[in-house]
């Protein structure tokens, strides 16, 4: 243990630090974005596929950062990357049909359905597949932003197990 830590901490009024944090948060929210417009957001190709982020731990100009929200598109006959993470995510299928492989079990869905990834101590492994050879799938995923409270591993790990084929092609 660092012997100087106690002396350093003694010099800080932590309650005042909370008040300072509150004031900074209030100031940030005054000018924060209240309406996030999809047409203003860029698409990215990452190891999970094609995504557009509405709320993300690193987006700090919105009035609310308690959620993570993204839209994902999967091309005809395509698939997302495969990932292991804590779960606790809700996915609404905007358009298309396909299935999610969740811990090795296939779960079919179509436009208008909701996929719920359970919250498990050891996490879940999942990957989405588009069964339509002519039309894309579009989905929106929402989960609590627990990154600040639990770190990126969120208690169970955060591992990319397989990249999306579209990402592989641009690497």
Image (cartoon, helix red, strand yellow):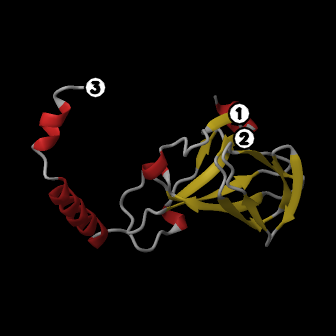
Q: Give the labeled residue for mark 2.
A: 81
Q: Of 125 and 76, which appears nearest the observer?
A: 125
Q: CA distance from mark 3 to mark 2?
A: 42 Å
- Find out whether the residues at labels 1 and 3 contact each other: C-beta distance under 8 Å: no
Residue 38 x %, y %:
54, 66
Q: How many marks?
A: 3
Q: Quadrant of the N terminus?
A: top left
Residue 85 x %, y %:
65, 44
- Helix, strand or loop for disc 1: strand
Q: Quadrant of the C terminus?
A: top right
Residue 1: assigned label: 3
For marks 3 and 2 on the same chain, the one whose residue lies earlier in the sequence? 3
Residue 64: assigned label: none
Q: Residue at x 42, y 50 (%)?
A: 148
Q: Residue at x 17, y 41 (%)?
A: 9
Residue 5 x %, y %:
19, 32
- Helix, strand or loop for disc 2: loop
For marks 1 and 2 on the same chain, the one whose residue lies earlier in the sequence? 2
Q: Give the labeled residue for mark 1.
A: 161
Q: Residues within 10 Å of mark 3 (few under 14, many from 20)?
A: few
Q: Of 58 and 123, which appears nearest the observer?
A: 123
């Amino acid at each position: 243990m660092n012997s100087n830590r106690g002396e350093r901490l003694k010099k800080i009024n932590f309650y005042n630090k909370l008040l300072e944090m509150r004031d900074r948060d209030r100031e940030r929210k005054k000018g924060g974005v209240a309406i996030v417009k999809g047409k203003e957001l860029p698409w990215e190709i990452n190891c999970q596929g094609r995504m557009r982020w509405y709320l993300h731990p690193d987006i700090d100009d919105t009035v609310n950062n308690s959620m993570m929200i993204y839209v994902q598109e999967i091309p005809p006959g395509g698939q997302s990357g495969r990932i292991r993470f804590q779960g606790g995510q809700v996915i609404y299928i905007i358009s298309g049909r396909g299935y999610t492989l969740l811990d090795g079990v296939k779960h079919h869905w179509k436009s208008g359905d909701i996929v719920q990834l359970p919250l498990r101590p050891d996490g879940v492994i999942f990957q989405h597949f588009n069964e339509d050879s002519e039309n894309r799938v579009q989905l929106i995923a929402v989960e609590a932003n627990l990154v600040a409270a639990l770190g990126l591993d969120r208690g169970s790990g955060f591992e990319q197990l397989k990249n999306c084929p579209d990402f592989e092609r641009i690497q």
